[in-house]
Image (spheres, rainbow, N blue to C red):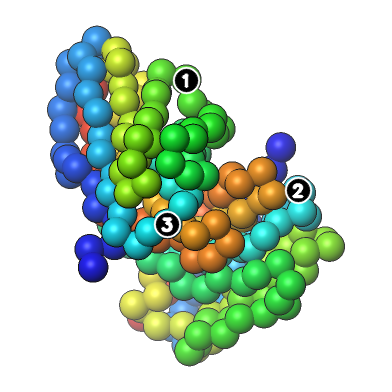
Amino acid sequence: NAGVTQTPKFRVLKTGQSMTLLCAQDMNHEYMYWYRQDPGMGLRLIHYSVGEGTTAKGEVPDGYNVSRLKKQNFLLGLESAAPSQTSVYFCASTTGYNEQFFGPGTRLTVL
Amino acid sequence: KQEVTQIPAALSVPEGENLVLNCSFTDSAIYNLQWFRQDPGKGLTSLLLIQSSQREQTSGRLNASLDKSSGRSTLYIAASQPGDSATYLCAVSGRDDKIIFGKGTRLHILP
């Protein structure tokens, strides 16, 4: 039982490049979330999903897209990376009304 | 729009003291509130989850209370230890399925 895993752990991009972050959970959770964490800002919600095939915008969705084609996976895409997207990205999952479980994070630097 | 505020932003106390961290939220229509701990450069560790129907939860030296009507939660740490030094985050799960975080309280326990 791996819980929530994130791939990759680190990544460096150049401005304008694209990439996809993968979040996977093996707890059969319906709800999945993507956050970004910047110094002094806490965690800010980017996008979330309440079930397979559904996605919704969070607090800071601009510049990101997501997909939930399989219940266990939640993908976060950056189509054209910008330096402002340099951050640590966390994924989380939950049954909906219970404890939220987090992945270890992905540290992304955009040059 | 749910807003979560944590006061103070930073706190330093001598070892052995009892302390209280505060979390307030603007929309009282919540499902639950969760407290997390985050060590520098690390992921989030869940401490306590309080459902909207509950008033408090306890785990060891930690006690979290919830007053949904006034939009407040407190995390009480008894007999603080240097190992308690970390950032403490609260997160509110709302009826719009979003989970919103405060910016955290950075706690430093002085040996």
Disc 1 residue type? Asp
- Residue B56 percent across, percent down from the top left: 67, 79
Task: Give the label on residue B26, or none.
Answer: 2
Chain letter for mark 1: A
Residues at marks 1 and 2, CA–CA distance in whole angstroms? 24 Å
Chain letter for mark 2: B
| A105, above or below B22, in the image | above
| B79, above or below A68, in the image | below
Q: State which mark lies toward you, 1 or 2.
A: 1
B62 horizontally vs A93: left or right: right
Task: Give the label on residue B2, or none.
Answer: none
Q: Nearer the viewer, residue B91 or A101?
A: A101
Disc 3 residue type? His
Task: Tell me which label, 3 or 1, sits earlier in the chain.
Answer: 3
Where residue B15 sits, quadrant-wise, is bottom left
Where residue B21 sits, quadrant-wise, is bottom right
Task: Give the label on residue A62, or none.
Answer: 1
Q: State which mark lies toward you, 3 or 1.
A: 3
- Residue B110 percent across, percent down from the top left: 40, 75
